[in-house]
Image (tube, helix red, strand yellow):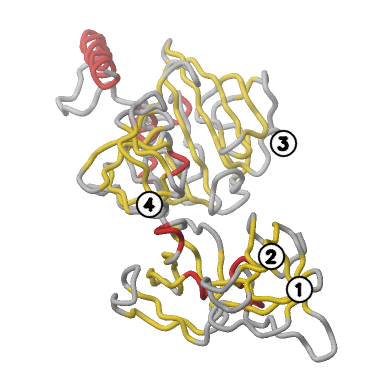
Amino acid sequence: MVQLSSLSRRIAALLLAAAVVMVPAAADVAVAPPADAAARPVAAPLKNDTYVLSSYYGPRCMPVRSASAFHRGQDLGAARGTDVRAVAGGTVRRAGAVRGFGQWVVVDHTIDGVRFSSLYAHLIDGDRRVTAGQRVSKGQHIGDVGSTGTSTSPHLHLEIWRGGYGTGRTVDPLRFLERRGIDLTTRSIRNYSRSVPSSCRYYTAAKVNFRTGPGTGYRVIRELQSNVTLGALPGDESGVWRKVTRSGRTGWIHRDYVSPGYTSQGTRYVLAGSLNLRSGPSTSHRVKRALPRDAKVALLRTGYRNGVWQRVRHGGTNGWVSARYLALNRDGASIVPKPSGRTYAWVDTSTLNLRSGPSASDRVRLRLRREERVRQLERVTDGWVKVRHDGRTGYVAARHLTSSRP
Ligand SMILES: [Zn+2]
């Protein structure tokens, strides 16, 4: 729609211009932009040769969890502190801090009778150089490139809203400026490739409902486990919902549960001397590698098959391990009482059985509750540790103990 209406406006402008001047026949020239910088309605937001065009306006794959799959602005990577200038004269609408964009400035303009807003995000300090309500001129220094908000390195995120910020729609800032005589692509140090991938790969960030539509009112197709692979198309979103494909079915997931990488569900440490990381959840699956005692692993999936097997990630490799050899703390394995001192641990589950021997078939002597303290008597062996509580001695599963006092 926007394309069409802007096209018809261009045609109208062409006809109007043709009535008074000779218009070159080039198809992509609407109105020849003024050659003289002062006569142009717009200016570049950053000085020539101070930036790289990194991420472009349009559909993309989500760069981080919860992010949009449609980039509403143009990113200009630049050194921290680089001057940011107003792309046109106008009135400052916002200046200060905002969630996500960090420190920002929004300026309202009227250009050729049309309302526009320009938005400058991730600045060092949004209200250091301008304040809301202030008039600014084209090219005026209004902020400084920073990396505040959701940003991994200093850059200016520039948005242009046709019809005003919040009420109108975003347009491609590069095209907006180029049509008015400022071609950012020829003024930059470098331009990254503009290609958009044909598909995106994501992972569920936690256990989540996979629905038939973009809202909690839609039917649940099924519950997905954490860290399962999802497919998607760039830009396929509806508000906070992302359209994804899992095992050939297409459905919707809330953006907070969609991540471009694995999301750890917790950290565990290997209790055994050498623990097999397997390709599947059984001892008949192939051993991918052996994990040493105390190795730190990230839990990818929890509660699978009663938690007997856990899907974990270690050193870039994913696999399955037997849950009984995982502890909450690194010193799960160093739970060795010093000859002189006493070592204590605390129950980290709602109830924990204290048994007569080191196996689940041994008789339960006592039920321990969360946060109760036990004294450790022996080294952990095969996931079991001998402890003492309230004058009674027995064995508990070491993975339900923590060495940090609640
Ligand atoms: Zn951006």
Establish if 148 lies above or below 220: below
Image quarter of residue 100 = top right
Of residue 19 and residue 202, the one placed in the foreground of this image is 202
In this view, the mark in front (3 or 4): 4
Q: Position of residue 374 (x, y in %)?
A: 75, 70
Question: Which tag, 1 or 4, sits closer to the chain's start?
Answer: 4
Mark 1 and mark 4: Cα distance apart in space: 46 Å
In this view, the mark in front (1 or 4): 1
Of residue 262 and residue 312, the one placed in the foreground of this image is 312
Question: Which tag, 1 or 3, sits closer to the chain's start?
Answer: 3
- Residue that mark 4 sits on: 203
- Residue that mark 3 sits on: 128
Residue at position x 46%, y 72% from top? 314
Badge 2 marks a residue whose secondary structure is strand
In this view, the mark in front (2 or 4): 2
The answer to whether any part of residue 196 appears in the image is: no
Of residue 49 and residue 260, the one placed in the foreground of this image is 260
Q: Which mark is residue 366?
A: 2
Question: Which tag, 2 or 4, sits closer to the chain's start?
Answer: 4
Residue at position x 34%, y 79% from top? 288
Mark 2 and mark 3: Cα distance apart in space: 64 Å
Q: Amino acid at mark 1?
A: Arg
Contact between labelled residues 2 and 1, with CB atoms less than 8 Å apart: yes
Q: Amino acid at mark 2?
A: Leu
Query: Mark 1 Cα within 10 Å, few/some/many (few <14, many 20+)?
Result: few
Mark 3 and mark 4: Cα distance apart in space: 40 Å
Q: Amino acid at mark 4?
A: Tyr
Whether disc 1's CB lies below 8 Å from ligand 1 is answered no
Question: Which tag, 3 or 4, sits closer to the chain's start?
Answer: 3
Establish if 90 lies above or below 50: above
- Residue that mark 1 sits on: 392
